Image (cartoon, rainbow, N blue to C red):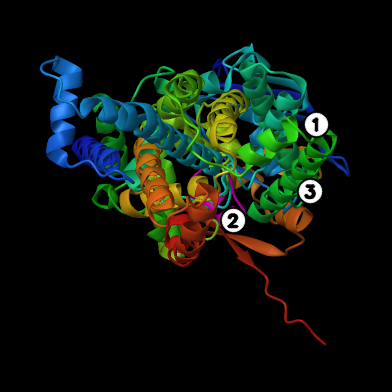
Amino acid sequence: MELKPIIEVKNLTFSYPAHQVLKKMNFALYPGEVVSLLGPNGCGKSTLIRLMLGLMRGSGDIRLDGAPLARYSHREIAQHIAYIPQHHSVPFNYTVAEMVMMGRAAKLGFFAQPGKRDREVAMEALRTVGIDGLASRPFGQLSGGQKQMVLLARALAQEVSTFIMDEPVTGLDYGNQMRLLEMISHLAGQGKTILKTTHYPDHALLVSSRVAVMHDGHMIDEGVPDAVITPEMLRRVYGVEADIVAHRDKNWCLPHFRRVCA
Amino acid sequence: MQRRCALALSAAFIVLLLVATLTLMWGQYPVDARTLAGFLEYKLFGGEALPQYALLENIIVQIRLPRILLAMLIGAALAISGAAFQAMFVNPLVSPGILGVLAGASFGAALGMLVSEQWWVVQALAFAFGFVAVGFAVMVGGMVRAGRSSIMLVLGGVISGSLFTALLSVVKYVADPYSTLPAIVYWLMGSLSMADLDGVALAAVPMLLGIGGLIVLGRYFDLLSLGDEEARALGINVARIRFIAIVLATLASALCVVMAGIIGWVGLIIPHIVRMAFGPSHSLLMPLSAITGAAFLLLADSVSRLALSVEIPIGILTSLIGIPVFIIVLKHARATWN
């Protein structure tokens, strides 16, 4: 495969004042992939994606479309990559349409106002994620699942082909988790490139073309989901004994549940 | 959506014109509508001068008009700066007053009166120290690592405000008790009564620049209010936009202090009221806050000069109105914040 990576990370090191988070990390994201980034709490997944989005600076080499990321402005990065944060509260209660319209920022000139085409793109994005009916609702009154869909629509309104998602299903109920995963799989089917962090090995097995596992500041394993998500990996990274079971052409994790003895 | 915005703006603007016309008529010497219309027609299109026009010229053009223009300018500047600060710091509890801008500007202006007779020096120092005061408030507010919280920034503003109030006392202490000190004290009490057309015209240029600039930046405030990280990820140069916005908002609100002393609460309550009525989208919120602030201060000033036989200082009046309004806003506003 002679594809050129969209984002390439080499020897990336990052430290907070108290401790080192990333230790000479290497990683690459190729066009058309859906990559799930797994790893325990505090292993540096969020730090890695923030660095890749140019929101923080580390030492090492990050390239976007072959050129050093540091040479891009925030506006230029937003014209390449859309970031979908975890859903959260916003201090002012914008409508869903207004939230999605903010995805157009990197497309508009400095003094320009959003025009007819921008509104069409925003509405189309809402239709794609299936919440166009909520356009005039206040964002703050939506459920967690709906909020996450709005943030996804906002990313679609950026009209880019690469998406980075920070734990997209965290905090959502079971139904919304499944609908979001289906949406991710739908976008992947349209040729979008997606990098998402997740805490659920099962989700990585469901919708990924590749899985990358972070542990202790290193990328310890990468590859197709079925090869990477193994009982050994789950034991090493999460300290959980589990079986990997095939069911309906998919692999699933079944953890061994131990009763805690007093 | 667009039509709703245009409608709201034109409605607000008509209300403002109406209030302005009414306040031209109200006063110790009431002018009825017909006389006013006749006088305006004479001023604009010429014609036969009636004997009382010399008196009207004095009352309306020399006394009421500059005061009305100044009230509108200050109300608009304070309200729009408040809306800007609330969005750029992602904090519905801040305003030019709470961030210490007004205290910093009053110290700067008093210092200017102390060291120079030049009016532009007073304006420049008011702006400079207003800017230093916000910077100091933000620095103090961000010092605690758990900071970035609404309360820490408010606390930073309180500390910054106290610092510059103390520095102001130093200026008063060293000022010449026979000339400079009375001038400073008199000006600090805050009043629109000293307005004259030339002075208003002079301050109007930078103030309108600040107000206009903040309106143009409108949609950026939506993005800034999402927080730094998200705004950057959406393609905004947060540091640059916020710097420009702080300069514009400080320019507008610091000059209010130079023109009429400290007038509190307008910058805090007007954006909340507009937000509750028309939603938080800043393309609409910014111009609408300016218009509403202008109308509010115009009415407050009318009350201040008409309610009692002596004039009530406008700053006292805006506090008396602002505090209960803010308490009501606080109770209702959670729905618009979270």
x, y (%) of residue A171? 53, 60
Q: Amino acid at mark 3?
A: Arg
Q: Which residue is located at x 13 percent, y 29 percent? A: B38
Q: Nearer the viewer, residue B138 or B24?
A: B24
x, y (%) of residue A56? 70, 31
Residue underneath mark 1? B176
Q: Please, is residue A252 above or below residue A69 in the view?
A: below
Residue at the far front: name it.
Answer: B51
Q: Amino acid at mark 2?
A: Tyr
Residue underneath mark 3? B145
Q: Nearer the viewer, residue B24 or B101?
A: B24
Please give the chain letter of the residue carrying mark 1.
B
- Labels 1, 2: front one: 1
Q: Secondary structure at mark 1?
A: loop
Q: Which residue is located at x 25 percent, y 36 percent? A: B17
The residue stretch that appears in magenta: A196-208
Residue underneath mark 2? A200
Q: Is residue A172 left or right of residue B117?
A: left
x, y (%) of residue B62? 37, 27
Q: How many callouts does the rendering have?
A: 3
Q: Secondary structure at mark 2?
A: loop
User: Splitting the image into 4 quarters, where does residue A20 fall?
Assistant: top right
Q: How many C-alpha atoms fall within 10 Å of the one at disc 3: few (<14), some, or many (≥20)?
A: few
- CB under 8 Å between discs 3 and 1: no
User: Splitting the image into 4 quarters, where does residue A161 fall?
Assistant: top left
* Alpha-carbon span between mark 3 and mark 1: 44 Å
Please give the chain letter of the residue carrying mark 3.
B
Picture disc at residue A41: none
Point out the image quarter for the N terminus of chain B.
Answer: top left
- Magenta stretch: residue B256 in it? no
Q: Tell which circle, 3 or 1, labels the residue nearer the N-terminal end.
A: 3
